Amino acid sequence: MVDDRALTALRGHDSELAQAAAALAIGGVADPWQVPLGDADRRLLALHRSATGRDLEVTVTCASCGTVNTAVLAPSTVPPWEPRSVWWGPGCGLREPVLADLADLPSTGAALELLRRCAVGPLPLDAEPSAVELVDTTLAGPLVVSCVDCGTSIEAPVDVEPLVLAALFRRLDAVDVEVHLLAEAYGWDLATIEALPGDRRARFASIVAEGR
């Protein structure tokens, strides 16, 4: 399990990209900026489970019958990451983007700049920015599930990176509430509270919140 205190490193970054790099570092990646985006998404799913004790879940309501469906996103439920590249000719090709390739992209022409950054060797004159999709292994796009009640196919937009980051920040907020409740109820200092195992801290905070 990831120590909750390690997650506080996320709060030192303002951009989603920097937060993703920090999260990968928390998960033990030595050089997160050089991790391929598809690999990063799967590592973030593993970090989510390690930090929260459960897998990431996405809910979507069936338009046909109104049933709320839940899809589990975990390293075991998504296709494993495999390196992907495009060969355009001798000494010429395209690699999958790494996290660093997304840094400081221009507000206009971002797709073309990303293509240039990922090109290996000279870029063919007829290369289109959309070619990057050929090496895209990220877990971003429509998630298709069958309604558990009526069987209708449902599409839900999914982007693992922001979903995991949002969940980790919710975890941080929940820990802050637990710390506040215990400090106020028992007068314990921060070091004492942080030394408690996470599950025990949560139980104490629940007792305080319920007024038992």
Image (cartoon, rainbow, N blue to C red):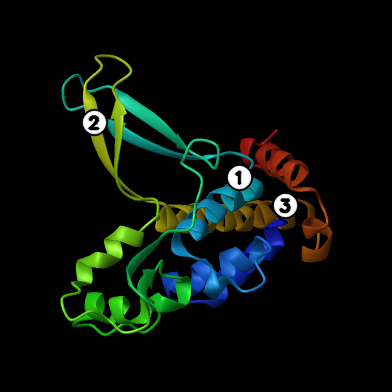
Residue that carries the numbered disc 3 in the rendered image:
182
- Cα separation, mark 1 vs mark 3, equals 25 Å
Location of residue 83 in the rendering, given as x and y in whole percent from the top left corner:
48, 58
Residue that carries the numbered disc 2 in the rendered image:
154
Q: Nearer the viewer, mark 2 or mark 3?
A: 2
Residue that carries the numbered disc 1 in the rendered image:
49
Classify 10 Å Cα crowding around label 2: few (below 14), some (14-19), many (20 and above): some
Q: Nearer the viewer, residue 187 or 60?
A: 60
Location of residue 57 in the rendering, given as x and y in whole percent from the top left corner:
45, 38
Query: Counting residues from the N terminus, which is met first, the one under dot 2 or under dot 3?
Result: 2
Query: Counting residues from the N terminus, which is met first, the one under dot 2 or under dot 1?
Result: 1
Answer above or below: position of 153 versus 188.
Answer: above
Answer above or below: position of 106 versus 34.
Answer: below
Residue at screen point 23% across, 26% down: 153
Classify 10 Å Cα crowding around label 1: few (below 14), some (14-19), many (20 and above): some
Q: Nearer the viewer, residue 158 or 135?
A: 135
At label 2, the amino acid type is Ile
- Secondary structure of the residue carrying numbered label 2: strand
- Cα separation, mark 2 vs mark 1, equals 25 Å
